[in-house]
Amino acid sequence: MIQEKRIVDHFASLVAIDAPSRGERALAETVKGQLRALGLSIEEDQAGAAIGGDCNNIYATWPGTLDWPPLIFCAHFDTVEPGQGKRAVIGSDGIITSAGDTVLGADDLSGLTAIVEAIRSIGEDGLEHRTVELFLTVAEEQHLLGSTHAELQRLKGRQAYVLDASGSPGTAIVQAPGNIGLVFELQGQSAHAGMEPEKGVSAITAAAKGIAAMRLGRIDTETTANIGRICGGGATNIVADACTVTAECRSRDWAKLEAQA
């Protein structure tokens, strides 16, 4: 039977383990130990070396008692920053939050917790089940970097559920957008802003004009675009000769995605 207190305690223990993108090994070893104790076999690929990280994607198999096709569950180990020194704070209303100085890491530690609890509960109750395969990835928060080096031939199932979304129980996301990241580097001409600004060409001004001309935010029901960071210039008395702008666009329609980019 699913045990709420056990879920909360397990989730809080995973939160306490730092797992930044490319630095997930400590968390992965903890989860691997738990899965082995529940009877799962574990394999790893070589994704860590390929992406400059300390951990690989994990493939785990729980043999079934039913002669049905395997079922795959997927989650990821890494959390976004600031994620060093995370801890779970359980309120009097039962709501779990971070301490306020880091993220909580529910993305995707809640998914990992749910998978382990489901397997543990099914095993304890002696329920019949099909073979379960787990695909646990690294560096997901870096635009799915870990899964781009997945060795999917290790998985036999053809039906999979990815536990990595918010929403009420029973909600399923059946389509996700593509993503294009953009970096604009603008070069201008420096000059003294108080003495001879007319001799300068401001890279920041050029960036601002370009951004003002862009369609941003909600473009349509399938497409979004956003400026994430602007960095440039230095002293206030110098016309900025360089500026970097980072942006992204997303769409569920590839033609729209390319057009927006």
Image (spheres, rainbow, N blue to C red):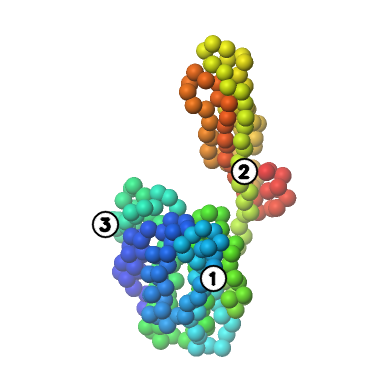
Residue at mark 2: 182
Identify the image quadrant of the N terminus: bottom left
Rounded to the nearest angstrom, the CA distance separating label 1 from label 2 is 30 Å
Q: Amino acid at mark 1?
A: Asp
Can the viewer see residue 238? yes
**Residue 208 spot, x, y in % from top left:** 59, 28
Of callouts 1 and 3, the N-terminal one: 1
Q: Amino acid at mark 3?
A: Ser
Could you tell me if the residues under marks 1 and 3 are in contact, i.e. CB atoms within 8 Å?
no
Q: How many marks?
A: 3
Left or right: 97 with respect to 53? left
- Observer-nearest of 193 and 250: 193
Q: Quadrant of residue 78?
A: bottom left
Crowdedness near tag 3: few (<14), some (14–19) or many (≥20) residues, C-alpha within 10 Å:
few
Could you tell me if the residues under marks 1 and 2 are in contact, i.e. CB atoms within 8 Å?
no
Residue shown at 53% from the left, 35% from the top: 230
Q: Which mark is residue 92?
A: 3
Crowdedness near tag 1: few (<14), some (14–19) or many (≥20) residues, C-alpha within 10 Å:
some
Residue shown at 58% from the left, 22% from the top: 190
